[in-house]
């Protein structure tokens, strides 16, 4: 083996895999090929937006829980519903008190999106969209499978252009907005 022979690493992709057809040339009817950038984009962000809750929120939450229990005792007379309400209330309190983790994200043009140690390949998604939620920006990756959950990732505004460029070369972009459930969750500060 000669020392000046260049060896390719297994993660290097062939040159033809690094090119994407982005349009058709109208004059020559030939595809216009654009090279995908090789450098991955990495950033850190919280896994979700944590909204602080005032003591009034907890008082109102306790009133709602006690109201459900009162309805159960007076109308339904089913101890299982009361137990379910109590368990759900405890779960909501624990969830709202837990601070979000700060995760490291990486977007590789050849492989996909890394969330911590987990890799989401581009072929798992059919499209993506950007959601602006107040002062926070997030990317929502729409799954290709019907009942798979979407992946929502918050990102800093400074890295937004690079992230959209890489995703836009692999997936079509859709215009997304917060749905009614997301709006209600934000209004309830959950």
Image (spheres, rainbow, N blue to C red):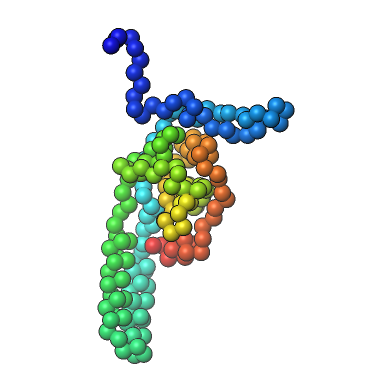
Instruction: Estimate the x, y position of residue 149 in percent, counting from the top left.
Output: 42, 56
Instruction: Estimate the x, y position of residue 109 in percent, counting from the top left.
Output: 45, 34
Frontmost residue, 135 versus 91: 91
Whether residue 77 sits left or right of residue 22 in the image: it is left
Q: Residue furthest right?
A: 27
Question: In which quadrant of the rendered image does the C terminus lie?
Answer: bottom left
Indicate the quadrant where residue 77 lies: bottom left
Frontmost residue, 127 versus 190: 127
The relative height of residue 162 versus residue 138 in the rendered view (above or below) is: above
Question: In which quadrant of the rendered image does the N terminus lie?
Answer: top left
Frontmost residue, 49 versus 76: 76
Query: Residue, x 63% and y 34% (percent of image)?
Result: 23
Query: Residue, x 40% and y 37% (percent of image)?
Result: 111
Instruction: Estimate the x, y position of residue 129 in percent, counting from the top left.
Output: 52, 48
Frontmost residue, 23 versus 86: 23
Q: Residue furthest front?
A: 1
* Visible residue check, residue 86: yes
Indicate the quadrant where residue 106 lies: top left
* Visible residue check, residue 41: no
Query: Residue, x 35% and y 72% (percent of image)?
Result: 61
The relative height of residue 96 versus residue 132 in the rendered view (above or below) is: below
Indicate the quadrant where residue 20 lies: top right
Instruction: Estimate the x, y position of residue 182 in percent, counting from the top left.
Output: 47, 61
In this rendering, the count of numbered labels is 0
């Amino acid at each position: 083996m000669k020392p000046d022979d260049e060896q390719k690493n297994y993660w290097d992709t062939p040159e033809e895999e690094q090119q994407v057809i982005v349009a058709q040339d109208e004059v020559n009817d030939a595809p216009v090929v654009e090279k995908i950038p090789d450098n991955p984009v990495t950033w850190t962000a919280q896994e979700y937006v944590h909204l602080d809750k005032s003591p009034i929120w907890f008082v109102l939450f306790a009133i709602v829980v006690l109201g459900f229990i009162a309805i159960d005792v007076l109308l339904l007379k089913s101890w299982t519903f009361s137990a379910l309400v109590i368990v759900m209330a405890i779960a909501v309190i624990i969830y709202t008190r837990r601070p979000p983790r700060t995760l490291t994200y990486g977007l590789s043009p050849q492989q996909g999106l890394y969330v911590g140690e987990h890799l989401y390949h581009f072929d798992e998604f059919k499209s993506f969209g950007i959601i602006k939620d107040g002062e926070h920006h997030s990317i929502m990756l729409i799954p290709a499978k019907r009942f798979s959950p979407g992946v929502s990732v918050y990102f800093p505004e400074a890295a937004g252009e690079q992230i959209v460029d890489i995703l836009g070369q692999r997936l079509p972009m859709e215009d997304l907005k917060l749905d009614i459930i997301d709006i209600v969750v934000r209004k309830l500060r959950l």
